[in-house]
Image (cartoon, rainbow, N blue to C red):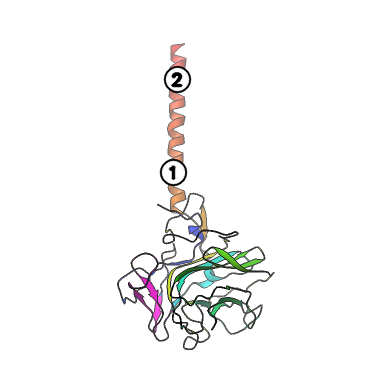
Amino acid sequence: MARDPYYGSVTASLHYNGADESTTFTDSSIFIRTVTANGGAQLTTGTKQFGTAGGDFTGTNAYLTIPGGTHFDLLGNDFTIEHWLNVPTSPNTGATFARTSSSGNASRYATFLTSGGKLEFFADGFSTVTAVVSTTTDLRDDTWHHVAFTRCGNLWSAWVDGVQEDSRTLDFTFTASNNNLFIGADAQSTTSRDPNIYMDDFRFTPGVCRYIATFAPPTEAFPDQGGVSVALVWIGLGGPVINRSRLLLDKAEAALSGTRRQRQIKSLVRSRRRR
């Protein structure tokens, strides 16, 4: 079973699994956030990349909202935001995800699907008219594409199907915010900036740059289990929380170590008795 060594850092993970036309969306991150469906947002079993269903955002004003507080802050840190997109040949322009705030606010970020089928990533504190990075592939082909945006240090990148299509070196820091994350529409205008698309497997990983070179796109849904390298997750002001897989491994190692120590002591005692 696949594991994600950065699972403890994931602050939102949506697989879009469920019954056809269901409006129940589940967050599979350790935070298990409440996801609210708005407008015509629903699941569809007819168009999906993995699992039992996909996210259908082709309805009127279809989008999701996720309250996350500071867990969706990007600040000046690394990040990876990724999703699978299936864009019809005649979509609307609009955002696949966006952080709410007033236009131009330095805490706000958003994607924008252009009329030419390219997906741009904006950081409003940098510019409201110039994208930081943008894909170059025309996504309007009714085909599933893995699209990711990353920051590694000051290198920002746009990836499509494992290929880096754009990059920019930029030293920029977002301000902190408690605002919601929108998926499937731009928080600035959910009625005019909803692109009418299908989406599958959305994953938000702040603090981690997952991709630094050409990679093979995922062949299965993102894992919901952490790897043994995940040790601590910081949850707001609540302090460190031990990742379950790491805790179990530590306990197993401690038990094994204790057993070995007991064997060593018994062996030493036996050898002395023989003398």
Mark whose residue sits in front, 2 or 1 = 1
Question: Residue 147 location in percent, x, y?
Answer: 51, 69
Query: Is label 1 in a helix, a strand or a loop?
Result: helix
Residue that badge 1 annotates: 251
- Pointer 1: residues within 10 angstroms few (<14), some, or many (20+)? few
The residue located at (35%, 68%) in the rendering is 17
Residue 217 shown in magenta: no
Seen from the viewer's position, the closer of residues 20 and 253 is 20
Q: Is residue 136 above or below residue 221?
A: below
Seen from the viewer's position, the closer of residues 142 and 24 is 142
Give me the disc on residue 220: none
Query: Is label 2 in a helix, a strand or a loop?
Result: helix
Three-letter amino acid code at disc 2?
Val
Residue that badge 2 annotates: 269
Span highlighted in magenta in the image: 36-63
For the residues labelled 2 and 1, the Cα–Cα distance comes to 27 Å
Residue 55 shown in magenta: yes
Question: Residue 269 location in percent, x, y?
Answer: 45, 20
